[in-house]
Amino acid sequence: MNVIPFDDRRLTAMGLLSEVNAGLAARMSPVFSAAGLSEIDFETLIRLARSPRQSLRMTDLSAQTGLSTSGVTRVVDRLEREGLVARIACATDRRASYATLTDEGRSRLEKVLPLHLEDIDECFTGLLGEEELEAFLATLRKIRDVVRPCATAGAETPGRTLTAEGGSPARSGASPSPATPYS
C-alpha cells in the first residue's frame, strides 16, 4: 500500500504560495477599488506603463496577463471607454493593434501607486532584507520563466511603428521605459 505524503514540503511550498497570494490580493484590493480599478485593470495599466513606449501589442498583453485574446480585448475595451488606454493600429501589420497607456491612465496609476507601494512595503518587500529580496526576486523569475514564459512577451520589440490617427508615430516624445514589465 502506498502512503500519501501529506506532509510533503512541495505541498507546503504550494500552500504557502497560495496563502500569500490570496492575502496580498485581499490587502491590495481596497486600494484598487478606491481608484475604480480591478486587479486585472491595474495589472494591465502597470504592464503598459512599464513597457517601451508605454504600449504593447494586444497579443503580447494577452500573453503577459495570462488572459485569452478575447479576455484582454474586453479589459482593453473597458479601459478605453474610461480613457485610460488607447488602441493604436500597427503601421506595418494591419492585423495588429497596440494598447497604449493614455495620459489619463498614467494619471490614475500615479494616484494609486503611492498607496499600493505602501501596502507592498508593509506586508511584502519591507519584511525582507536587501539580500533576501534580491534572492527572492531571482527565485520568482526562475519559477516564472518556467510556468509563464510569455510573461514578458513583447517587452522589447525593435523597429515597431505605431500610428495615431494622423499617421504620425504615437508617443514619439515618450521617455524610455524599463525593458520588461516585471523583469
Image (cartoon, rainbow, N blue to C red):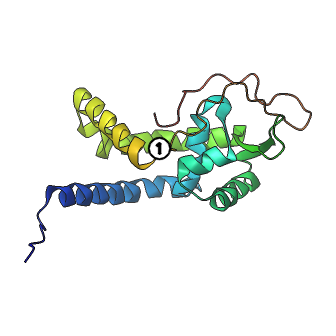
Establish if 35 lies above or below 111: below
Q: Residue at x 35, y 60 (%)?
A: 22
Establish if 112 lies above or below 74: above
Based on the displayed image, in which of its 4 quarters is residue 46 positioned? Answer: top right
Within 10 Å of the Cα at label 1, are there few (<14), some (14-19), or many (20+) other Cα atoms? Answer: some
Residue 43 in sight: no
Based on the displayed image, in which of its 4 quarters is residue 14 positioned? Answer: bottom left
Q: Residue at x 82, y 34 (%)?
A: 92
Q: Nearer the viewer, residue 10 or 65?
A: 10
Residue 176 on image: x %, y %: 62, 22
Quadrant occupied by the C terminus = top left
Q: What is the secondary structure assignment of the residue under circle 1?
A: loop
Q: Residue furthest bottom?
A: 1
**Left or right, 92 with reference to 100:** right
Residue 127 on image: x %, y %: 24, 39
Residue 146 in sight: yes
Q: Residue at x 53, y 32 (%)?
A: 180
Residue 167 on image: x %, y %: 90, 32
Quadrant occupied by the N terminus = bottom left
Q: Which residue is mark 1?
A: 149
Q: Amino acid at mark 1?
A: Pro
Q: Residue at x 13, y 71 (%)?
A: 4
Q: Nearer the viewer, residue 110 or 41?
A: 41
Q: Nearer the viewer, residue 35 or 56?
A: 56
> How many marks are shown on the rendered structure?
1
**Left or right, 120 with reference to 37:** left
Q: Residue furthest right?
A: 166
